[in-house]
Image: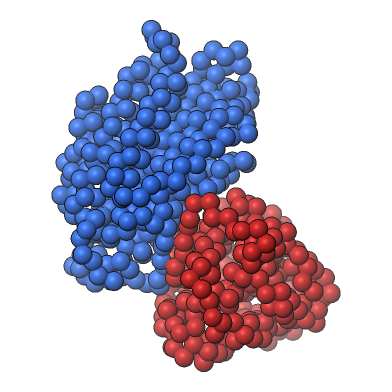
Chain colours: A red, B blue
Amino acid sequence: MQALENNVEKPIREKMEQYILSLQERIVKEIESIDNKKFYIDRWERAQGGYGISCILQDGNVFEKAGVNISVVSGDLPKPAIQQMKSHHKELDPSKGPLPFFALGISIVIHPHNPHAPTIHMNYRYFEIENKDGSPLSWWFGGGSDLTPSYLYEDDAIHFHKTLKDACDKHDPNYYPDFKKWCDEYFYLKHRSEARGVGGIFFDDLDNKPPEKILAFVKQCGDSFLPSYVPLVKRRMNATFTAEEKRWQQLRRGRYVEFNLVWDRGTKFGLQTPGARIESIFMSLPLTARWEYMHIPEKNSREDKLMQVLKHPKNWV
Amino acid sequence: MQALENNVEKPIREKMEQYILSLQERIVKEIESIDNKKFYIDRWERAQGGYGISCILQDGNVFEKAGVNISVVSGDLPKPAIQQMKSHHKELDPSKGPLPFFALGISIVIHPHNPHAPTIHMNYRYFEIENKDGSPLSWWFGGGSDLTPSYLYEDDAIHFHKTLKDACDKHDPNYYPDFKKWCDEYFYLKHRSEARGVGGIFFDDLDNKPPEKILAFVKQCGDSFLPSYVPLVKRRMNATFTAEEKRWQQLRRGRYVEFNLVWDRGTKFGLQTPGARIESIFMSLPLTARWEYMHIPEKNSREDKLMQVLKHPKNWV
């Protein structure tokens, strides 16, 4: 971990807060302009400290459900939570807890109606722990973005990965290869032996450069969200589709629910946190989902072609 | 634990197997006669030992999804699994593992189309562990049945509980009160602070009477399944309903998925078991489900009345 205070006028967490607020606004505006329906904007306060803004668009013209959420929370981190974080942050000493913490982030999940348009997820977050006297102790960034199509369009997967790779490469040549691999490993349904989607990037506990540098990288990633996704939605949102294709999409939505409820660490952590805001955590769930017994796509069908890629994640760029 | 071999001609596990096979057949026939559509019957073998029969009816005339599953499996129980079971079965010694085990049970989940007809779940199972020389070491029964309506009909809840209580009372006056409470505690969504439904009975690790006696009790419970449920379905399956009522049912289905994927120990155990048959585990999931942001029923609406009972489980008999 590098020191926090290398000639920074404002604390990093304030800069991150400012950034996610402006990014949320930009993304909400752009999604609204595509959908022609307004988000419902829900600002909430957290009793123990902090606030959030949940923007939600349900049953729109283009999007089945879109959630663009930010939260900026603070409080005291109990000893067991410090213990959990210690494996990645040696400077933490659980016996000194509870310790003041700040956690802020932006989370987005967008599920379009059209089965040919992919679902996207993005999350960037910053975490900071202080000593009891208020001096900085530990901080890190985490996040990523990944794409979950119901039908595979190789061009879409390539465009998505290329946009993320370009953002990564401006900051570190290892970021994209490392974080692409991490993403494939993280968004994986072990009980199905299949990936959630065609991947993207994922990282956590990132603190090996000065915080200003990592913040610049995270901003680059956040800025690449709209360019990575909007062209794909525009390309697919008006495609004609059959009832069978819609049904397949609904089955894939079921898999999305399975991942989020069974495997996603963020969701699990949230559900076990007393006083967590369940509705904001579950914004990521699709509006509708479906489970059928033993639905196996026909060999070499378009559905089967998606499954092949989910069973054997590939390199897109 | 009582001895297994008190003047029993056939081993208990064979009697239980015979019983669940015949119960499955009876229930499948009755549900088919109500729905006027046939179950899809899927017999499978388990590579490590044993078999199962999954009967599934999807998108029927009355039922959205009905799964009636039995499994009869055996193999070697590894040390960590024995360790987990030791807390309830002192005679188990993990250091002696792996040990031969037998596990058999019947599992049912039925989701009707009509939002006024309730979902039902039932499961009865028998578990046995042997010493390496084949002599009996440990055995127990577990199971229960619970009802999950989208709209509360007090008469239905009373009928359901009364049928289960009558079955329990024939065997032990403590069974119903104890197992009713256990059910309320088990089928509970901690992250929502609400029960899954109006409860029923639930028990596990039952071995405090001779196995023949507990088997007789389990049979009584299994036999009470159709009388506890069929009258309710017949009463509600043709009720008229609005699009809003269907939507509410779909939201409640979402809660059902949340419970099964986040909290249900059986599901969690299954998902973490290498080689587990995922499709049989997920038979319990509804065909369709829905999640909306911050859907809160209007005060004193019928939807709100259900919520009041889920927030504060009550005694029905």
Residue B267 in picture, x, y percent from top left: 49, 45
Q: Where A102 sits versus B212, above or below?
A: below
Q: Where A138 sits versus B262, above or below?
A: below
Nearest the viewer among A128 and B84 is: B84
Nearest the viewer among A315 and B86 is: A315
Image quadrant where residue A177 sits: bottom right
Left or right of A267? Residue A309 is right
**Residue at figure coordinates x 49%, y 20% from the top left:** B138
**Residue at figure coordinates x 60%, y 12% from the top left:** B133
Residue B83 in picture, x, y percent from top left: 57, 30
Q: Does residue A150 appear in this view?
A: yes
Q: Quadrant of the N terminus of chain B?
A: top left
Q: Where B134 sits versus A314, above or below?
A: above
Left or right of B126? Residue A2 is right
Nearest the viewer among A195 and B307 is: A195
Badge count: 0
Q: Does residue B189 appear in this view?
A: no
Residue B310 in picture, x, y percent from top left: 28, 55
Left or right of B119? Residue A97 is right
**Residue at figure coordinates x 73%, y 59% from the top left:** A312
Nearest the viewer among B265 and A210 is: B265
Image quadrant where residue B241 sits: bottom left
Q: Quadrant of the C terminus of chain B?
A: top left
**Residue at figure coordinates x 43%, y 78% from the top left:** A58
